[in-house]
Each structure stands twice: as C-alpha cells, then as structure tokens.
C-alpha cells in the first residue's frame, strides 16, 4: 500500500512539472514576434539631428498652409473691393451734351401738365452733368469701411501665421520627445526579453521558483505593451506633423 501511494505521488509530480515546462516554453515566442511586428517608424531617422532647423521648417509650414493662403486670398479680394468703392462714382455719374439752332420761330409745348415756350434763334449747345448728392456725403465713409476691412484681413493673416508657428513649435517638440521615449521603450523591451530568456533558462535548470518566472513574464508583457503604445503615439504625432507642415519629413532632411 505504501509503495502504491509513492507511485501515485511521483506520477502527479511528473505531470505538474511537464505542465509548467510547456507553459514556460510557449510564452517567450510572443515577445520575439511583438518586437518585430511593432518596429519603430523611420527608426534610422534622428529627427533632432537629421531634419532642417526649426526656423526653416516654420517657413515651409507658412508657405504650404491652406489657412495662410485663404487669408491672403481674402486680402486680395478686399484690395479689389476698395478699388471698386473708390471708382463707384462712375456708376452714378450721368452726363448729357446737346445742341440746337433756330430762326426766331416761337416754339410752344406742354410739359408735366404746364406750358412752356422757347424762341429759337441761332445756335445753342451745352453739357449737363448730374452727380447724386449722396455721393458727397457717403463716399468717404464707404472708402473708410473698405480700408478698415482690408486692415482687419491683414491682421487676421498675421494672427493665423502666429497661431500656426506656435502649433508647429509645439508639435515639433512633442514629436522629438515621442521619438526619444520610443527609443527608451524599445531598449526596455529588449532588456525585458533578455531577462526573461535568462530567467527561463534558470527555471528549466531548477535554479529559481515559479514565482520568479511569473514576475519575469509580467515584466516582459509590460515592456511590450509600453513599446506598442509608444510606437502608436509616435506614428500619430509624425503623421499629424507632416499634415501640419504640408511635406513629408523625408523631404526636409539636412
């Protein structure tokens, strides 16, 4: 009976050991695949060293910005509107030239319910010019309104450029920080993978307990997760920055 109990106990211990070994062998393959699958974007490009100076990037962003171009179009439209207002008197001005001749004949006529007569003798000629009185009272005010709107359009353009420059500076520095953080997370993931492999080897050799193996695995999963999140953040910032300045980063290398 005692020999039978010892055999049963030995079989149970062998099964538990086999199960733990299988679990330990299946986990590290995930870490290696994850490192390859989430490799950094443009890892060979050091943004801080390889890109043009920030001042030149700012000028590129201003040149390519649709917001700046829209404000410039508004300024051009307002300039033409001011020109039209200054020449508006030409639309309301009316002129008429006339001439006539006669030989002492008496001409009777009716006009607006009344009577009139003219004695035509010799030649008559003249020129009539009609200018609405409102043109004298409102013309200056209309011109001042258009001038004020033109100045407002220019200030709007300056405001847009200032906001754009601030946004470029902010996103540029966030992008640099994201790339540095990604390098740190990548190194941390690699160190965690190496630590896991060393821990796994010692576990197979029986040098450490299962708790130590579990902690190494948890550290590796945390490092992999941090790298994936860092890669995602870097990609978002990179694409957003390229949209903001209007060109690909590869085209603005030194």
Image (spheres, grey):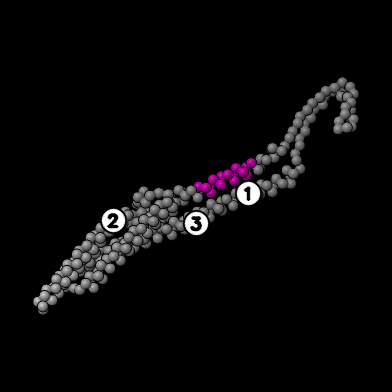
162 w.r.t. 204: above or below: above
Is most of the magenta stretch helix, strand or loop? helix
CA neighbours of label 1 inside 10 A, class few (<14), some (14 to 19), many (20+): some
Q: CA distance from mark 3 to mark 1?
A: 25 Å
Disc ID at residue 37? 2
* Marks 3,2: beta carbons within 8 A: no
* Marks 2,1: beta carbons within 8 A: no
Residue that carries the numbered disc 3 in the rendered image: 163
CA neighbours of label 2 inside 10 A, class few (<14), some (14 to 19), many (20+): few
CA neighbours of label 3 inside 10 A, class few (<14), some (14 to 19), many (20+): few
Q: Is residue 225 left or right of residue 83?
A: left
Provide the secondary structure element on which disc 3 rests.
helix
Find out whether residue 38 is within the magenta segment. Answer: no
Residue that carries the numbered disc 1 in the rendered image: 147
User: Closest to the observer: 92 or 241?
Assistant: 241
87 w.r.t. 21: above or below: above
Residue 208 percent coordinates (x, y): 19, 73
Q: Is residue 203 visible?
A: no
Residue 119 percent coordinates (x, y): 89, 25
**Tag 2 or tag 3, which sits nearer the N-term?**
2
Residue 114 percent coordinates (x, y): 89, 32
Magenta stretch, residue numbers? 69-84
Residue at 39% x, 56% y: name it: 236
Provide the secondary structure element on which disc 2 rests.
helix
Residue 7 percent coordinates (x, y): 11, 73
Q: Quadrant of residue 85?
A: top right
Q: CA distance from mark 2 to mark 1?
A: 60 Å
Q: Is residue 80 left or right of residue 27?
A: right
96 w.r.t. 60: above or below: above
The outermost residue toward the bottom is 2
Q: Is residue 51 visible?
A: yes
């Amino acid at each position: 009976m005692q020999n039978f109990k010892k055999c049963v106990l030995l079989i149970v211990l062998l099964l538990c050991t086999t199960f733990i070994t299988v679990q330990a062998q299946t986990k590290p393959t995930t870490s290696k695949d994850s490192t390859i699958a989430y490799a950094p974007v443009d890892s060979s490009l050091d943004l801080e060293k390889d890109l043009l100076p920030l001042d030149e990037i700012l000028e590129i962003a201003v040149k390519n910005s649709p917001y700046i171009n829209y404000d410039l179009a508004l300024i051009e439209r307002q300039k033409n509107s001011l020109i039209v207002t200054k020449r508006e008197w030409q639309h309301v001005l009316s002129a008429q030239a006339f001439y006539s001749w006669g030989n002492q004949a008496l001409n009777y006529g009716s006009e607006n319910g009344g009577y009139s007569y003219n004695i035509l003798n010799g030649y008559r000629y003249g020129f009539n010019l009609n200018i609405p009185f409102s043109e004298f009272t409102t013309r200056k005010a209309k011109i001042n309104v258009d001038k004020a709107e033109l100045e407002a359009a220019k200030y709007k353009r300056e405001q847009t450029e200032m906001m754009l420059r601030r946004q470029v500076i902010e996103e540029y520095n966030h992008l640099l920080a994201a790339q540095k953080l990604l390098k740190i997370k990548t190194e941390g993931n690699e160190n965690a993978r190496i630590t896991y492999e060393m821990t796994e080897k010692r576990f197979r050799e029986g040098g450490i307990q299962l708790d130590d193996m579990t902690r190494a695995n948890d550290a590796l999963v945390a490092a992999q997760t941090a790298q994936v999140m860092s890669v995602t953040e870097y990609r978002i910032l990179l694409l957003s920055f390229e949209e903001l300045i209007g060109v690909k980063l590869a085209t603005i290398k030194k």
